[in-house]
Image (cartoon, rainbow, N blue to C red):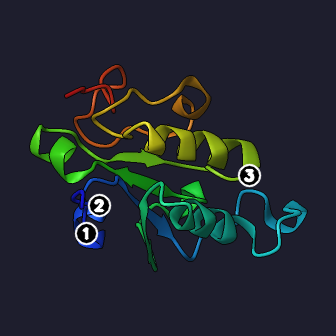
Amino acid sequence: MPDTPTEPAREATLPGLTACSLCAGETLGHRDPMPGGQMARLRAVAERVAARLTFVECLDECERGDVVVARPSGSCRRAGAAPVWFERLAGDHQTRALEDWLRAGGPGARAVPPELSEHVIHRGSEAPDVVGSTTH
């Protein structure tokens, strides 16, 4: 019988996603046609096993709305990859681009795709041209 990874081992290879539960849905507001809004989109990404999802009450970027942090997988983190912060990331198109990027490995495995790059929050000493571009 072939070895199959256990659930915790498989999850450790996934990138993570942290979203602010208080600002999820702010960008589209009442115009969002999705039942459950942006939180439902992010939950669907996790259910399709593209990332490990964590909702927190606040990411202390309240003025930016729909703040999401893509966290590197364990192996990418060990190779030096850093989380990538996004602002105003909402809607079907942007969430699909996020999911595709996470499926491709996310931070540390692939550069931030162009359709998401305008939403990157450059924090502290992060240089705009290297955020999320480390490969392993």
For the residues labelled 3 and 1, the Cα–Cα distance comes to 33 Å
Circles 2, 1 touching at the beta carbon (< 8 Å): yes
Residue at the disc numbered 3: 91
User: Image point 56% across, 24% down: which residue?
Assistant: 114
Residue at the disc numbered 1: 6
Residue that extends furthest to the top in the rendered view of this protein: 129
Residue 34: x %, y % from top left: 83, 65
Q: Is residue 95 left or right of residue 82?
A: right
Q: Is residue 102 left or right of residue 84?
A: right
Circles 3, 1 touching at the beta carbon (< 8 Å): no
Residue 32 versus residue 93: which sits nearer the camera? Answer: 93
Q: Amino acid at mark 3?
A: Gly
Q: Dot 1: few (<14), some (14–19), or many (≥20) neighbours within 10 Å?
A: few
Residue depth check, mark 3 versus mark 1: number of the one nearer the observer: 1
Q: Amino acid at mark 2?
A: Arg
Q: Dot 3: few (<14), some (14–19), or many (≥20) neighbours within 10 Å?
A: some
User: Image point 31% across, 33% down: which residue?
Assistant: 109
Label 2 residue SS: helix
Q: Judge whether 40 appears above or below 31 on screen.
A: below
Residue at the disc numbered 2: 10
Residue 65 visible (yes or no): yes
Residue depth check, mark 2 versus mark 3: number of the one nearer the observer: 2
Residue 24 visible (yes or no): no
Residue that extends furthest to the bottom in the rendered view of this protein: 57
Q: Amino acid at mark 1?
A: Thr
Earlier residue among tags 2 and 3: 2
Label 3 residue SS: loop
Residue 63: x %, y % from top left: 56, 59
